[in-house]
């Protein structure tokens, strides 16, 4: 598969996001509905022949299981299909940074931020466990922080129904599902895996957010799994003195070797986390989202961009965006121009005319896509940047007019004293 391939006669691949042992994830665009999507493939030829049937069932179960979890902390599933030898799932493309990268950048997260992330994960696990679903591979790499601080739990790919018959049919023979650094002792030993295993993994993630490293480390996977089974439970306050004693006790309980010694449910864990959020009692997943890290949290660009860009390349990108716009693929066209603007050299006079034209095109595309808030911001910023130029006053007035039009489309009042009423 490569960029530009069409899947299911409607999805265009744009760039690879990542891959695992048997699968690959691409970012793409739904041409029919003009929206970005994530497309996850199960590459059947990379699966051992005697496991293909089981892997295919697990893959289809992921789509159906995730689609049932109607929760803002789980990416929406849009479609399921077959492309050549490969199965694929089409899902919501989630912007932001994975928690693993955020921890690597910050080393140790503030206590309130770590607690808020864990509490949001609990709301997702509570919904999943109520639907008899266990994630089985919860880890920082599977937790995404969006630019607004909302946590998305990714990859229910090894989720299985709690019923033993279903679990036995979906579990690969002789293979332990999960990631060694976050795997529950009973899971490492190949025993029955229930909601308590997800709570153990959450304890590992919470420990790592606070300490900057997982609770157990070893030179190889077998040794690491043995440490989860046999090693003493680490005390978080030995690594971080500002962690409240009650929170340290909760982390210790989540890491209990025996599943029955852990908290009874994700909802109970969430309630135990509430006092450490710092803003008093908050209830419900929406309220939790409002207390998370701010929208200024670092997040990675959604699309790979070139290191340099030339005037000719800007012209080509504008032409490409216009071609997409003619097919009413306004969101995809806008993303192309946004990507270009991120790498335009500052202060390069050769590009000034092309940059202005590109910014006008981008603002208009956002307007056509119905993203009135971002369009208003784009028009307003352009007007302010050009207001000192005598040659661009007609464009400045047009941008101001369009900004007000966007504001009216959102049902917000305008300032009668002037053409711009931007907050």
Image (tube, rainbow, N blue to C red):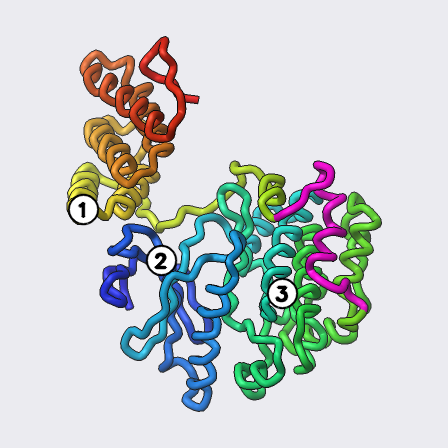
- CA–CA distance between discs 1 and 2? 18 Å
Return the mark for residue 320.
1
Q: Which one is earlier in the sequence, the residue at label 2 or at label 3?
A: 2
Q: Secondary structure at mark 3?
A: helix
Magenta includes 278?
Answer: yes
- CA–CA distance between discs 2 and 3? 31 Å
Residue 271 higher or lower than 63, as above or below: above
- CA–CA distance between discs 1 and 3? 47 Å
Q: Are marks 1 and 3 in contact (CB under 8 Å)?
A: no
Residue under circle 3? 130
Q: Residue furthest front?
A: 411
Quadrant of the image for the C terminus?
top left
Residue 329 higher or lower than 168, as above or below: above
Q: Percent x, y for residue 394? A: 19, 16
Residue under circle 2? 27
Does residue 136 appear anywhere in the picture? no
Does residue 335 appear anywhere in the picture? yes
Q: Which one is earlier in the sequence, the residue at label 1 or at label 2?
A: 2
């Amino acid at each position: 598969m490569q960029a530009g391939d069409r899947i299911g006669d409607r999805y265009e691949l744009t760039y690879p996001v990542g891959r695992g042992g048997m699968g690959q994830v691409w970012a793409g665009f739904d041409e029919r509905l003009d929206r970005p999507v994530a497309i996850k493939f199960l590459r059947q030829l990379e699966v051992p022949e005697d496991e293909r049937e089981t892997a295919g069932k697990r893959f289809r179960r992921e789509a159906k299981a995730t689609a049932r979890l109607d929760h803002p902390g789980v990416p929406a599933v849009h479609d399921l299909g077959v492309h050549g030898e490969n199965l694929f799932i089409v899902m919501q493309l989630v912007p932001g940074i994975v928690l693993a990268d955020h921890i690597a950048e910050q080393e140790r997260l503030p206590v309130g931020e770590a607690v808020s992330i864990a509490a949001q994960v609990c709301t997702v696990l509570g919904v999943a466990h109520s639907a008899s679903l266990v994630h089985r591979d919860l880890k920082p790499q599977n937790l995404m922080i969006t630019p607004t601080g909302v946590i998305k739990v990714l990859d229910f790919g090894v989720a299985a129904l709690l019923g033993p018959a279903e679990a036995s049919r979906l579990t690969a023979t002789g293979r332990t599902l999960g990631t060694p650094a976050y795997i529950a002792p009973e899971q490492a030993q190949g025993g029955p895996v229930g909601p308590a295993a997800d709570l153990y993994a959450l304890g590992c993630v919470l420990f790592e957010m606070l300490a900057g490293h997982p609770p157990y480390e070893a030179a190889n996977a077998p040794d690491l799994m043995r440490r989860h089974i046999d090693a003493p439970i680490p005390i978080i306050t030995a690594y971080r003195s500002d962690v409240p004693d009650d929170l340290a006790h909760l982390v210790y309980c989540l890491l209990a070797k025996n599943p029955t010694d852990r908290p009874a449910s994700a909802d109970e864990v969430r309630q135990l986390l509430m006092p450490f959020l710092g803003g008093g009692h908050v209830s419900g997943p929406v309220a939790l989202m409002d207390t998370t890290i701010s929208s200024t949290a670092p997040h990675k660009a959604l699309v790979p961009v070139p290191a340099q860009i030339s005037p000719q390349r800007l012209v080509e990108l504008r032409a490409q965006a216009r071609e997409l716009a003619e097919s009413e693929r306004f969101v995809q066209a806008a993303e192309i121009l946004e990507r270009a603007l991120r790498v335009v050299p500052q202060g390069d006079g050769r590009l000034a005319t092309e940059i202005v034209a590109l910014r006008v095109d981008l603002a208009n595309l956002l307007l056509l896509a119905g993203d009135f808030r971002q369009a208003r911001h784009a028009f307003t910023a352009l007007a302010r940047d050009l207001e000192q130029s005598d040659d661009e006053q007609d464009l400045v007035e047009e941008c101001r007019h369009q900004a007000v039009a966007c504001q009216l489309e959102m049902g917000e009042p305008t300032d009668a004293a002037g053409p711009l009423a931007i907050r």
